[in-house]
Image: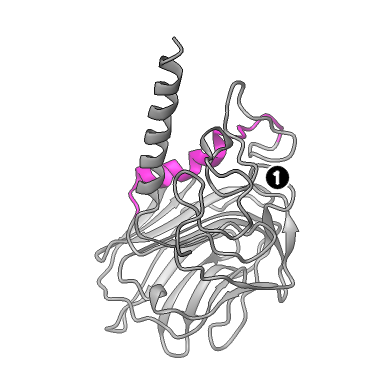
Amino acid sequence: MKLLFPLFSMLLLVLCASASAGINDGLIAHWPLDGDGWDLGPYALNGYVTGAVAGEDVSGFPGGALRFNGEDDVVEVPDQQLFNAQTLTITAWIRPDHSSQWARIVDKYDHVNESGYAFHLNHDTYVSFEFWSQDGEHYSVTSATPISMGQWIYVAATYDGSMLRLYQDGELVDDNQAQGPIRHSTRNLSIGNGFDGYHSWPYAGTIDEVRFYDRALSQSEIAMLVSDALSLYPDTGPDDAPGPGDQPRPGCSCPDSDHDGVPDAWDACPGTYPGAYTDSTGCPQAGM
C-alpha cells in the first residue's frame, strides 16, 4: 500500500499535466484579472488598468476579478502581431450589472476602417461577436436569448477560418459560415471598453478569466474551461451561479492558493509570485 499512493499521485500529476498542456495549446494570452492586468500566458502581454477595481471572481474569491464602472474603466493591451490570428478563440466570465448598448467585453474593432473584431453585448443583453474580413464582409454571431443581469455566465467565441461559433456556459448558441481572412485593426486590445473610431462602448459589471487563443477551441475544450470553475465552487446559494457563500465540493482537493491555475494538490511550486507564467506543475517557466 505504501507504493500504491505514490504511484497514484504520480499518475494524477501526469494526467493533470497532460490536460493542462492540451488546453493551453495555442494560448496567446490569459488575463485572470486578479485585480490587475497581468498576463499569465507565454508572451507576458500585460494590460494597463484604468479605473477598474478588484472584485469577487466567479468562485467568490475577493479580488479575483475586475469590476468596471460602465463609464471610462478599461484594461488596455498594446497592439501585437500575435492578436492578428486568422483562427481564434476568445473566452471570458462576465457578470454585467446592467444592460448597456454595445458594451465591449473584449475589443479590437475599428468601425472607421472596417477592420478588427469585437466581443460585446448586442442590443443591451444579447451576447455577440463580430469581425470584418479582408474582402470587406462583416460576419457576426449573436445569442438568441438575453442574458440575466447580476449573474455569472461563461462566453466564448471561436473562428476556424470558415465557421464562426458562439458559446454560453459551454453550450453552442449560434454559428454562422464566414470567409476569412480577418482584416485586422491596429487598435490596442481592450477589455471592458472599446473605441471603434466613433464612440466608446463601456461595460458595467465584472469580468474574470479572459483568454485569447490563435486556434478555434472545440466545444469539449470550452466546456472544460467552464467546469474548471464550476467544479471547484458549485452553486449552493440562491442565485443559480457560483459566488460568495458557495462551498467547494466535499472531498475536493482543488484550492489554488497562489492562483497560478494549478491546484494545490499537485502544485510543485506553491507560492508562485503573481504574474508568473507557470508550467503544468505550477513552476515558473524557464526564461519567462
Residue 208, position in %: x, y? Answer: 61, 55
Image: 68 above or below 133: above
Name the one closer to the observer, 26 or 200.
26
Say if the magenta span includes residue 64.
Answer: no
Furthest toward the top, the residue is 1
Residue 74, position in %: x, y? Answer: 65, 73
Q: Residues within 10 Å of mark 1 (few under 14, many from 20)?
A: few
Image point (54%, 33%), residue name: 231
Residue 12, position in %: x, y? Answer: 42, 29
Image point (65%, 47%), residue name: 151
Name the one closer to the observer, 51 or 147.
51
Image: 211 above or below 137: above
Q: Mark 1 is on which residue type?
A: Phe
Horizontal placement of 160 versus 46: left or right? Answer: left
Q: Of helix, strand and loop, which one carries label 1? A: loop
Name the one closer to the observer, 42 or 194.
42
